[in-house]
Amino acid sequence: MPHILITNDDGVNAPGLLALAQALREIGQVSILAPDRNWSVTGHNKTLHKPMRVWPVTLADGSEALTTDGSPSDCVALAVMGLIETPIDMVISGVNNRPNLGDDITYSGTVAAAMEGVISGYPAIAVSIEEGEPYHWRTAARAAARIAQKILKNGGMPRGTLLNVNVPNLPEEQVKGCQVTRLGQRRYHDQLIVRQDPGGRPYYWIGGEPPTSVLEPGADVYALAHGYISVTPLSLDMTHHAFLDTLRQWLEPAP
Ligand code: MN
């Protein structure tokens, strides 16, 4: 039975984490180390300048978990460095309570936790679901379990690779299937909101409408918008390989 480490960025009491744990217990042994609070949109970070605490908690179904005041990526680092003694076969982060599509991944604490897993040498999956009430957590959690099983059965992934999974918020029987996709394009509509504190000094919020998607076939945003589970393989090698030669010609002129 594989041993799967679970974390998230919505906090240890988030319903998506519980659903994920319940679905993954069907296919393996599960250990949970998740943040004690919401770390959404905090990207990839590492706590080096202050100590972290870890303590046990009981989830809503009575199962045991560990929580910490560290970040999602700290959770993975702490676990694989020895805080969890049983060897880990895979890291899964989620189920996040909103999608992580296109450039969203650069902000995402959910994806960052999976990145930390990959950096430490473990196959990793980030799982997110579309927003909406009611949430169909089970759809996303069971999709994650099926995908994890396929990856383990096929011997893992290429080094430096993680899967970014986005699931439609639908009952399981209404999901059309699974599409392997590339990152799509998100359009952000952020606006600077300026207010004044009681002392008359300005303070700032980033506000505005939620991001929208550019719907192109083959992209993650397109698959999700059409009722499919989107699975995007991401590489931590962010080198733009196709641009290397051109840039060399610009910056390394022949003597
Ligand atoms: Mn989140």
Image (cartoon, rainbow, N blue to C red):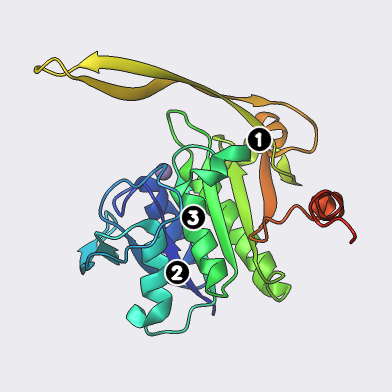
Residue at 31%, 45% (x, y): give it: 38
| Residue at the disc numbered 3 | 112
Contact check, label 1 and label 3, Cβ < 8 Å: no
Asked if disc 1 is less than 8 Å from ligand 1, the answer is no
Of 4 and 53, nearer the camera is 53
Q: Position of residue 110 (x, y in %)?
A: 47, 51
Q: Residue furthest right?
A: 254
Where's residue 99, x and y in %? 53, 38
| Residue 70 in the figure: left or right of residue 216 | left
Query: Can residue 27 be seen in the rendering of this structure?
Result: no
Q: Position of residue 15 (x, y in %)?
A: 36, 46
Query: What residue is at 82 percent from the left and 57 percent from the top?
Result: 252
Circle 1 or circle 3, nearest the eye: 3
SS type, badge 3: helix
Residue type highlighted by circle 2: Leu
Is 204 located above or below residue 24 in the figure? above
Going from the N terminus, do you reach mark 2 or mark 3 first? 2
Relative to 37, does residue 84 appear above or below in the rendering? below
The quarter of the rendering in which ligand 1 is drawn is top left
Residue matched to label 2: 5
Q: Is residue 222 left or right of residue 144?
A: right
Disc 3 marks which amino acid?
Ala
**Residue density around tag 2, few if under 14, some if 14–19, many if 20 or more, within 10 Å:** many
Q: Residue at x 61, y 51 (%)?
A: 164
**How far separated are the C-alphas under marks 1 and 3?**
21 Å
Label 1: which secondary element: helix
Q: What is the C-alpha distance between the residues marked 2 and 3?
A: 14 Å
